Image (tube, helix red, strand yellow):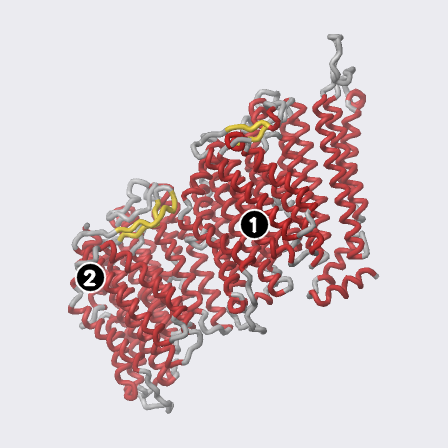
């Protein structure tokens, strides 16, 4: 059985991965809101997690715990372990990103990229006047 | 001098100017000590250069290896015949220029005299290192050091004009050397696997003769200091510097480093025989002929004395490059001699221009009418210097011009003879014009003349040297012929 | 632990010492003690790196198995001429930047943040060393993220003097995370095809598997991710803001070592992991790496010429210099890769020194340094200015400085590879680069509006002068670096 439908049936999981990946990347690029950008990043990273898990999964395979029976197919455990690491990294990235967004909000009074960009020019004044300008930004 | 081996003399000649430069800031608070340090350093350097030249004449080639720059390429100094000549010229004239610059800077009440003196000595150090460099890469290294160390001197006045001139100076000299000279050097290195200077050249079996014109072009234009048209604009621009800079650096050290490099490349890298056999130098003969005449015509239009001298220098530098491009042994000797003769003559002219400026603050030739009787010695020296540049006996300049003409005839390029003759006529017109005005025209401006003796005696002495070189050119002739025969 | 055990564990220690010290430093309340620990950490790791370098001078290479698990199952650290050289350069520069950070960092961040800042500093150093040492493709991603996240923290610390540092940090985080994720995707493809993550193992397996699109796609994703991290044009956009708004000490640290590690990884992936598929790498080099490198060289140089803010100018210059390194790797001959390693070392010394000098200016004057504030600094702060000038002249390749040696070897490699046109472009851009330095040099000795001398403290100018002297030393006697770079190139490219 070949044709587009067959591909869809056989590898729908990869299609999901691609959709999530493109969607996430699109959000990162297109959104102005800094939090939404982070959400996009998280989706993008999650798609990669799914990709690894799909690769490691053997059809009909079970968890790789040694059993007495000899004809058991095991799924590859390594991708799962890798993704465990990647998830930790992803969480750290998101956490740090959100922390930065908080600080940006405190400093600029906005979390919209374009608004902050417009404010940057006002910030490039000598140190003495900078405090005044940041309070302007907060209004 | 028995206590000095040629090798220690070589070290002293390289190090003495540098030590002078490093000591100058510390002597800055005591102006008299500082100003004596320069000439003392110069005398030491000159004695060392004499010693080195003497050894080279007897067939030696002193060498000093400092460090390894690249596998097979050392940071080393080794004196060739041509290098001995240039080293003598640069260090010998530094003595007089050093004395003169003290008089000029004090007479003119210039600022930052310490900085000036320090960079002046660094520039001489770089010129000596260029003269005695052991291979093409070391030569390039100090060629660049020379450019950078003269920048503070060119922009000494700190005015907008000086800054603009400094930009032009840097962009042409650094631009040409980086874009053309460096790849040419590396190309030679890649093709031959070596960069040292060998009589007869190293390229003979390494590159085909089709490449020769292109490689020669990369060198000729890459050596911006030789002021070959169209890369000559930096030299008139550099005239914004105080006159001692123009005198020693832009009539002797810097520009001569340029033509010295060109001649070295032709004699010791290409090899005269290989260059003439390949015919790759012909286009350069035409271009230098054009530069000689064109810059002479430009010089005629200049009313500013230093600008006129600058264009005259451009023209004279092309004599040397022409001698190299003709690629005959006589012409190459003429080129080597011209480095010496033109240096003595042109430094005299610049000394005089500066002396006139210090004495009565005149820079325009049209203002000089009738000023001669007030400044007899200065204009007398100017006259002798001009004769040497024109090439009229009994001055040294007549030797080099004679050799160049014979060389041109030897190469079968008869039109070059016409170019050289026409150029001499133009020289007579634009160099003797200021002298004639000064003595024979009625005075148009009343000016107060205020001497500084240290600005007057150096030009008189160099004028004497110009005459002396006519009668005692022997050692230089020997070195020049050793350069092509050894 | 006996001495021999320590020696055997050097490759692990060079990475582990800074990483393990980081949490300790984070808990130290006293900022001076935290700094001492940071100096000890980077210093020890420098000693380890030098010892490692000593052990590979004979051309030897060996592996270090983390936790004694042999590859391809365990994670392997590869010690050869290339990784040893890069680690020495990086830990040396990190050590000098840490010396500067005593006064340099504290002047620009709050005292209470100091412990955390030094912790992030150590994490960044350890992460970047790990990036270079590791021989495992996935482990590389972990180090990539350790160094990236800690760098983001360090960059954002600049908000004490300029709030734009926060945005710069955020953007670096975002772009860096996307880049790292791209890299992971690439690793996933390669793993799916070969079933291995060990680089040496991969190098053997990739030629044997069917050359499907998967290999190409994997290679492409991995390269794309690394290009982002190495700040190669046009994915360099995070770099100028990050370098210019970070605290001065951080700018110096990152400029000296951060992109260098990624550039090394780039070479490693191209020349080791994918050494078995020369046609794939050849395409990548010819149609991607060389054009992008040239683009970066010109864009960086031209933007620098028109920039007045000195830190940003230096950052743009870094984009151009990274282009030179990438171009040298793009030549893909032994001479080219060697030239790339020479410039990795030289540029670290040059740009590290320049950022330290600008940091010294900024701290002494208490303001951001632009062209106007450089006027007359030669008279007001002569020691720092002359150090800056030496590094600057080295940047534009004045002979007898490190920069000239880089230029010499790059041009030589290009001529040997018959890339005469590209060589012309390189030299032209190199002449252009004089312009942006020269506009600074011109004003240094002008008459300043305020001509009072500014006090200079040894804590700020001694590290700078170490690098300035390094520049001259590497310019006059470059033989050790050149030989080490040559060995590194031989091991990476082999007899190609």
Residue under numbered circle 2? B476
A135 vs A44, nearest the viewer: A135
Determine the residue positioned at 40% across, 66% down: B119
The N terminus of chain C lies in quadrant = top right
Q: Which image quadrant is residue B94 in?
A: bottom left
| Above/below status of C26 relative to B399 | above
Q: Which mark is residue C320?
A: 1
C103 sits to left or right of B294: right
Looking at the rendered structure, whether the residues under marks 1 and 2 are on a common chain is answered as: no
Determine the residue positioned at 34% across, 81% down: B356
* Residue B307 % position (x, y): 39, 73
Residue A46 visible? The answer is yes
B405 sits to left or right of C51: left
Dot 1: within a 10 Å radius of its alpha carbon, few (fewer than 14), some, or many (20 or more) residues? Answer: many
Determine the residue positioned at 58% across, 27% down: C65
* Residue B254 % position (x, y): 35, 63
């Amino acid at each position: 059985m070949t044709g587009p439908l067959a591909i869809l049936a056989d590898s729908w999981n990869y299609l999901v991965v691609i959709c999530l990946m493109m969607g996430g990347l699109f959000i990162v690029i297109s959104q102005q809101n800094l939090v939404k950008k982070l959400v996009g990043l998280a989706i993008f990273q999650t798609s990669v997690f799914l990709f690894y898990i799909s690769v490691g999964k053997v059809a009909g395979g079970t968890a790789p715990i040694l059993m007495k029976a000899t004809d058991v197919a095991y799924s590859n455990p390594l991708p799962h372990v890798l993704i465990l690491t990647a998830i930790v990294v992803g969480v750290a990235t998101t956490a740090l990103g959100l922390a930065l967004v908080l600080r940006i909000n405190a400093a600029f009074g906005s979390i919209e990229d374009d608004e902050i960009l417009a404010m940057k020019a006002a910030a490039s004044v000598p140190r003495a006047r900078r405090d005044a300008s940041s309070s302007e930004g907060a209004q | 001098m028995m206590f000095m081996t040629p090798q220690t003399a070589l070290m002293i000649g390289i190090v003495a100017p540098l030590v002078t430069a490093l000591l100058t800031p510390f002597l800055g608070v005591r102006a008299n000590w500082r100003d004596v340090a320069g000439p003392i350093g110069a005398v030491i350097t000159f004695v060392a250069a004499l010693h080195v030249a003497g050894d080279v004449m007897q067939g030696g080639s002193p060498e000093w290896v400092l460090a390894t720059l690249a596998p097979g390429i050392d940071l080393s100094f080794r004196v060739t015949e041509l290098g001995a000549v240039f080293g003598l010229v640069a260090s010998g004239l530094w003595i007089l220029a050093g004395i003169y610059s003290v008089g000029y800077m004090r007479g003119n009440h210039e600022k930052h005299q310490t900085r000036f003196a320090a960079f002046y000595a660094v520039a001489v150090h770089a010129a000596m290192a260029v003269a005695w460099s052991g291979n093409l890469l070391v030569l390039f290294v100090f060629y660049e050091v020379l450019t950078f160390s003269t920048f503070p001197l060119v922009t000494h006045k700190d005015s907008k004009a000086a800054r603009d001139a400094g930009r032009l100076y840097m962009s042409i000299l650094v631009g040409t050397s980086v874009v053309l000279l460096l790849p040419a050097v590396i190309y030679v290195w890649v093709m031959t696997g070596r960069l040292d200077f060998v009589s007869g050249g190293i390229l003979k079996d390494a590159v085909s003769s089709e490449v020769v014109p292109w490689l020669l072009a990369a060198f000729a234009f890459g050596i911006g200091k030789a002021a070959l048209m169209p890369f000559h604009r930096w030299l008139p621009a550099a005239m914004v510097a105080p006159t001692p800079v123009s005198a020693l650096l832009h009539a002797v050290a810097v520009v001569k480093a340029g033509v010295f490099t060109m001649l070295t490349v032709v004699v010791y890298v290409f090899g005269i025989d290989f260059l003439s056999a390949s015919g790759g130098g012909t286009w350069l003969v035409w271009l230098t002929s054009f530069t000689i005449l064109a810059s002479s015509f430009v010089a005629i239009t200049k009313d500013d004395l230093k600008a006129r001298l600058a264009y005259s220098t451009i023209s004279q530098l092309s004599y040397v490059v022409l001698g190299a491009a003709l690629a005959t042994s006589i012409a190459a000797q003429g080129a080597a001699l011209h480095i010496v003769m033109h240096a003595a003559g042109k430094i005299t002219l610049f000394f005089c221009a500066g002396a006139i400026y210090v004495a009565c603050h005149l820079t325009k030739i049209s203002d000089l009418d009738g000023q001669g009787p007030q400044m007899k010695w200065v204009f007398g020296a100017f006259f002798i210097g001009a004769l040497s540049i024109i090439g009229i006996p009994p001055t040294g300049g007549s030797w080099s011009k004679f050799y160049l003409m014979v060389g041109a005839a030897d190469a079968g390029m008869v039109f070059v003879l016409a170019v050289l003759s026409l150029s001499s006529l133009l020289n007579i017109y634009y160099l003797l014009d200021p002298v004639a005005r000064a003595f024979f025209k009625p005075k148009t401006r009343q000016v107060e003349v205020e001497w500084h003796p240290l600005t007057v005696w150096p030009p008189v002495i160099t004028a004497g040297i110009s005459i002396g070189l006519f009668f005692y050119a022997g050692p230089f002739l020997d070195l020049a012929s050793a350069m092509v025969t050894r | 632990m006996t001495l021999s055990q320590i020696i055997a564990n050097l490759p692990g220690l060079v990475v582990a010492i800074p990483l393990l010290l980081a949490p300790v430093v984070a808990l130290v309340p006293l900022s001076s003690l935290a700094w001492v620990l940071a100096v000890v950490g980077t210093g020890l790791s420098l000693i380890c790196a030098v010892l490692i370098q000593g052990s590979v001078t004979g051309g030897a290479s060996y592996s270090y198995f983390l936790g004694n698990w042999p590859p391809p199952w365990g994670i392997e650290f590869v010690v050869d001429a290339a990784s040893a050289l890069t680690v020495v350069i990086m830990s040396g520069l990190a050590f000098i930047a840490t010396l500067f950070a005593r006064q340099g960092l504290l002047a620009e961040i709050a005292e209470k943040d100091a412990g955390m800042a030094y912790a992030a500093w150590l994490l960044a150093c350890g992460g970047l060393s790990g990036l270079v040492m590791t021989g495992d493709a996935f482990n590389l991603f972990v180090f990539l993220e350790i160094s990236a996240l800690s760098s983001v923290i360090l960059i954002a610390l600049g908000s004490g003097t300029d709030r734009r540092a926060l945005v710069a940090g955020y953007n670096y985080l975002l772009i860096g995370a996307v880049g790292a994720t791209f890299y992971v995707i690439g690793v996933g493809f390669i793993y799916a095809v070969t079933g291995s993550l060990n680089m040496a193992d991969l190098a053997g397996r990739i030629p044997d598997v069917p050359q499907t699109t998967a290999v190409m796609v994997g290679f492409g994703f991995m390269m794309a991710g690394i290009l982002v991290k190495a700040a190669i044009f046009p994915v360099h956009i995070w770099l100028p803001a990050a370098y210019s708004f970070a605290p001065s000490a951080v700018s110096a640290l990152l400029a000296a070592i951060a992109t260098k590690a990624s550039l090394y990884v780039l070479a490693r992936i191209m020349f080791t992991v994918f050494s078995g598929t020369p046609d794939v790498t050849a395409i990548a080099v010819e149609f991607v790496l060389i054009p992008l490198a040239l683009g970066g060289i010109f864009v960086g140089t031209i933007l620098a010429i028109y920039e007045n803010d000195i830190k940003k100018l230096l950052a743009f210059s870094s984009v151009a210099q990274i282009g030179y390194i990438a171009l040298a790797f793009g030549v893909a001959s032994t001479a080219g890769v060697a030239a790339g390693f020479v410039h990795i070392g030289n540029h670290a010394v040059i740009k590290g020194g320049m950022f330290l000098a600008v940091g010294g200016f900024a701290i002494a004057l208490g303001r951001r340094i632009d062209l106007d504030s450089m006027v007359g600094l030669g008279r007001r702060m002569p020691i720092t200015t002359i150090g800056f000038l030496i590094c600057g002249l080295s940047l534009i390749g004045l002979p007898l400085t490190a920069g000239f040696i880089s230029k010499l070897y790059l041009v030589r490699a290009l001529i040997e590879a018959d890339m005469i046109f590209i060589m012309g472009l390189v030299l032209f851009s190199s002449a252009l680069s004089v312009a942006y330095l020269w506009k600074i040099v011109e004003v240094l000795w002008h008459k300043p509006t305020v001509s009072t001398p500014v006090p200079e403290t040894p804590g700020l100018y001694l590290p700078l002068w170490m690098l300035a002297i390094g520049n001259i030393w590497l310019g006059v006697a470059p033989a050790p670096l050149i030989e080490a770079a040559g060995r590194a190139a031989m091991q990476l490219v082999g007899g190609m």
